[in-house]
Image: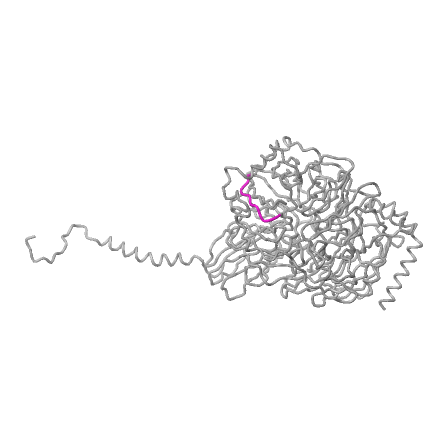
Amino acid sequence: MKSRVLVLCLVIFAYFYYNNGAAQSEDSNKNKFRQRQATDDAIGYPNLDEDDLLNTQCPQHLELRWQTEVSSSIFASPLIADINSDGKLEVVVPSFVHYLEVLEGSDGEKMPGWPAFHQSTVHSSPLLYDIDKDGVREIVLATYNGEVLFFRVSGYLMSDKLEIPRLKVRKDWYVGLQSDPVDRSHPDVHDEQLVQEAHLNSLTHKNGIAHGANTSHTEAQLESDGSSHAMHEADLNRSGSSVSTPKEPQNIVNISNIISEEKINGSQIDMDDSVSKDLNSTVGSGLEKVVNTNNGTTTGRRLLEESKANSKEEVHVATVENDGDLEADAAASFDLFQDDDELSDQYNYDYDDYVDEKQWGEEEWTEVQHEKVEDYVHIDAHVLNTPVIADIDQDGVSEMVVAVSYFFDHEYYDNPEHLKELGDSITIGKYVAGGIVVFDLETKQVKWSTQLDQSTDTGDFRAYIYSSPTVVDLDGDGNMDILVGTSFGLFYVLDHKGKLPETFCIIYSSSVLRMLVLGITSVSAGNVREKFPLEMAEIQGAVIAADINDDGKIELVTTDTHGNVAAWTTQGKEIWETHLKSLIPQGPVVGDVDGDGHTDIVVPTLSGNIHVLSGKDGSAVRPYPYRTHGRIMNQLLLVDLSKRGEKKKGLTIVTTSFDGYLYLIDGPTSCADVVDIGETSYSMVLADNVDGGDDLDLVVTTMNGNVFCFSTPAPHHPLKAWRVPNQGRNNVANRFNRQGIYVTPSSRAFRDEEGKNFWVELDIVDKYRFPSGSQAPYNVTISLLVPGNYQGERTIKQNHIFDRDGIHRVKLPTVGVRTAGTVLVEMVDKNGIHFSDDFSLTFHLYYYKLLKWLLVLPMLGMFGVLVILRPHEAMPLPSFSRNTDL
């Protein structure tokens, strides 16, 4: 039956393709979306006038609290959390190579027992989860080599870990494939550049020219129109990136295979023979694809190595990436962080002074031996983003959703011994894939998996997944949907079940046949929602889910490397789109930037422009865009930096730029204050009361391995905190004066509790929407995590549903042992958007104070009695001498 369906669909495709080719080519020229280009990336950055930049009219008065150097570059954003329940915050830093570090928030000192060693590199931020149910949340770290590790708060690497299975595919799956088998002439965004390339490549195909190999669902092409723009690609490897040579645009029309059959077989995921051999199953452009413009300066997401493209015309570019010697004045500027008398000598150290070389294990990572199966190959799994932890199917057990990239690391297999282990017939560049793997955190086993795309690494698009998945309830059924964008230019929405019909044949048409997709799946594949995937250019930033137009409903926003920003309904219908003319490396953030009462979307770009768009229609909010003097590669921070007593509307945009400055841009006016840190950064600036004072602090990490903590004059508030890029799960919106939940100051104060119960006071904030109203009901879960020698359930949970915002009081039990604990408060609104807050406290730890008084008070009482009853007149001391004359 399956073979009959396959043959039938192929016949239909062949008929429409050969009879409607001319119509497709004509329609391609009319599609405005595919004709767009990231033209701003071809313009050099403006000359940097440091005097003008530093002489700001809107100073924010930042002060450097502390600075610490870690073991290597910091690519992923850190995590701010109280990991040991002592009432003080720590900064968990994932250095790029081998070490996970934890710094004291008060002074930046290394915590005892840290850093912790592992064998991999890291592209993801740390998370917290109690994997062993002992009442203490472990630090979770997904590594490049396809493992999820768990570290205790002491720095001990646990034996428990999650291993992502390899992907099993046929060795000859790519035979006969064309460079890009997807009809890209009708994308779901209006990109004229993609349309032109589709038309050009279709003509090339008709002339009998064939190139490369690549397969996909539906996708978008990154490179430009046949002009002399160079393209170079940096292939991701275990320590950075390597440069491949430019290539010409390649032909594009063919069928594609949405999902190939997968089976969880021991430690392997299988792809069905009949599908993987004959069909194309697609993917995005390379993990490190870089779009080099005329000046050779712009780039896609790069890691540690910055590639340099040849350019015919030299253009001055403002950047801190300079291999030459610094001028004397420039070199002296770095003394700000080294010789300042106000900083303690403890910060002027070399990292080698405190690194114990004995902590280093075997640095060389060795892949587990590959299973040898005739006609098949097992592709190594890699994680290039941060996973998400959530109970996606409401079964009471949390799952971990991981977006996985499958490929053979070129640096590792450059070793002939490693390559030999694969077999002589394997060309490692022919195997790249992407997919979603979901782990059950109770059993620590794969619950289900879905392969999304597959490609070679020589095509125009390769099947990597840069961005973290987003989980949110799109249809109100209580179960979470999984949103992810791929570098193939596809935006997927999968449900929570992990099942698809046994056989399906989809014909996507618009007056003619646009694309034919065939696939045969098993129960291991996630269910792709109707109308999805949607097609754009390469997607590097995360898909965001938020109420962007204040209508009380969730909208979805995607961005791509051509500079397209598109807003969609949850059913996949376009609301609006706009073109920013520059590569967008990160997902947007959401908030009322200018203080006008309406939600805005803030987008960083490679050109250095920061765009603020109206959430209602995508129009530009004036006076933006704001232009920095270098590319912006990190997610932006939106925060209220109003000083005490100051009545100020709007938010402040905080970001680093590759010109070496930290920018603090006033939302309503776009007036900026800058701090010269002299280093570049890919990680987000985080905010919280890190040093234990009463003000808000900013944490900045750099590719030089430095961690800076700056204090601001703004008072701290729990809803101003931004401790991790997605704020825990799916929230990229500013919460202060918008929406959220927090524990009031009186309840969150670090204290010792006695008795049988204690009260926690919660404040639910939801006041920014008008006239759509609130997002009630609010589903609130309060978890008391109790470590130590407590014999009961280590996690005590209470669930409450509130139908209004405001202050609510909840009673929690006090445990009867001496221990510390953490109270975790989580809220999900009617749209499935997640909010959280937590605080620490102790139980019965200070009973010795009572014991002290029980011992001291009786002694003091006796002494007092003696003093009171002592004689008031002098009396001779008794004498036993017989001489009475004395």
Q: Is residue 595 left or right of residue 4?
A: left
Q: Quadrant of the N terminus?
A: bottom right
Residue 812 in the image: state x and y as whole percent: 52, 59
The correct choice, above or below, for 786 with respect to 242 in the image is: below
Q: Which residue: 91% across, 58% down?
A: 14
Residue 334 is a magenta residue: no
Q: Residue furthest bottom?
A: 1
* Coloring applied to the structure: one colour
Residue 299 in the image: state x and y as whole percent: 73, 44
Magenta stretch secondary structure, dominant: strand
The correct choice, above or below, for 756 with respect to 331 in the image is: below
State the residue in front, 11 or 599. Answer: 11
What span is in magenta?
A: 63-72
Q: Residue furthest left?
A: 885
Q: Is residue 268 left or right of residue 700?
A: right
State the residue in front, 578 or 237. Answer: 237
**Corner quadrant of residue 54:** top right
Residue 208 in the image: state x and y as whole percent: 91, 52
Q: Which residue: 53% across, 49% down?
A: 354
Q: Which residue: 11% across, 58% down?
A: 880
Q: Residue furthest front?
A: 416
